[in-house]
Amino acid sequence: MTPQSIPFTNSHSVVSLIREKRSPLPLTLTAKPSNVAIDLARSALVVVDMQNDFCHSDGWFATSGTNIAYARDIIGDVAALISSAREREVPVIHLHWGVRGDTLELSHSQLMFGTRFGKRKGYGDKAAAGHRILVSDEWGAEAIDELKPAVEDIVVHKSRFSGFWHTELDAILRRLDVSTLLFAGINTERCVMATLQDASFLGYNVVLMEDAVATPSPEASKQAALTLIRQLYGFTAVGCSLVD
C-alpha cells in the first residue's frame, strides 16, 4: 500500500486536506464465530515474532531448551499468507522483539521472567551463537531467512508482549489508513494475543489467521485464546491466502 500523499494543490491560496481513498477490495474469510468480509484496501497483515531468536536452531529459544518445531511447522503457511498479502498490496508488518542493548526499557519483572529467575540467559545477554539476545539490529531480532522482509514491508520492534506499547505501530497503521488487522506468528496466547487485544481496544477490526499461528503451550492455552477472541475481540479465520 502506498502511503497517502501530502494533500497540496497547485493553488497558492488553498491547501487541500482531502485524501484519496483506495477503492474497496472485499474478501470473505471462512471464520468463527461467523464468516467475515474484510476490505483488503484498508487491511494489514501483522506477522508476530517470526525471528531468529525464537525460530532458528541457533536462537535463544532452541539453545535454552525450547523445542521450536511448533514455530518451524507454520513457516510455510506464514510465507504463503505473506505472499498473498503482497500480491493484493496489503501491507505486511513484521513485528519483532527488539530491545536496547542495555535493556533499560525493560522492567525488573520482565528481566526476571526472561531468565526464568536466573535459570537461563535472558534479554540482552550474549547467546551461544554470539549475538545479544533479542537486541535490536542484531541477528536474534531479525526475521528468519524464510520470511525476510521485502523492500515494501514494514519492520517494527517491540519490548513488550503487545506491539502497541512504546512503539510506532499505531501511528504507522493510521498513516496507512488501516482499519483491519490480520494476525499471524507466535506465540498464539502471548504476543499475538496481547497485540490483538490492544488493537481491538484501539478500535481496529481484528482477525486471527488460525492456520498461521502457533504456541509451545498446552493445546488448552491456544483453545482458550481462540475462544476469547471469538467471544470478545474479533474473528479467527482459516486458510493462508488473501487471494480469491
Image (cartoon, rainbow, N blue to C red):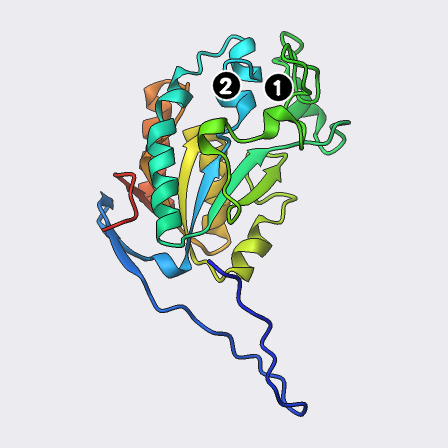
Q: Quadrant of residue 96?
A: top right
Query: Dot 1 lies on which element?
Result: helix
Which residue is nearer to you in this view: 61 or 6? 6
**Mark 1 highlights which residue?**
113
**Mark 2 highlights which residue?**
56
Residue 132, horizontal then vertical, whole percent: 69, 20
Residue 111, horizontal then vertical, whole percent: 68, 22
Tell us which disc is closer to us: 2 or 1: 2
For the residue carrying disc 1, how many other residues have a C-alpha within 10 Å: few (<14), some (14-19), or many (20+)?
some
Residue 239, horizontal then vertical, whole percent: 26, 39
Query: Compared to 211, does 62 lie above or below?
Result: above
Residue 3 as seen in the image, left or right of residue 228: right
Residue, x 38% and y 35% (percent of image)? 79
Can you name the residue that lies furthest to the bottom here? 13
Residue 28 as seen in the image, left or right of residue 18: left
Q: How far apart are marks 2 and 1 (CA)?
A: 21 Å
Residue 46, horizontal then vertical, whole percent: 46, 43
Which residue is nearer to you in this view: 49 or 197? 49
Query: Dot 2 lies on which element?
Result: loop
Q: What residue type is labelled 2?
A: His
- Residue 45 is marked as none
Query: Compared to 59, does 170 lie above or below?
Result: below
For the residue carrying disc 2, how many other residues have a C-alpha within 10 Å: few (<14), some (14-19), or many (20+)?
many
Q: How many dots with numbers?
A: 2
Residue, x 43% and y 33% (percent of image)? 185
Residue, x 35% and y 69% (percent of image)? 23
Residue 77 as seen in the image, left or right of residue 47: left
Which residue is nearer to you in this view: 87 or 92? 87
User: Counting residues from the N terminus, which is met first, the one under dot 2 or under dot 1?
Assistant: 2
Q: What residue type is labelled 1?
A: Phe
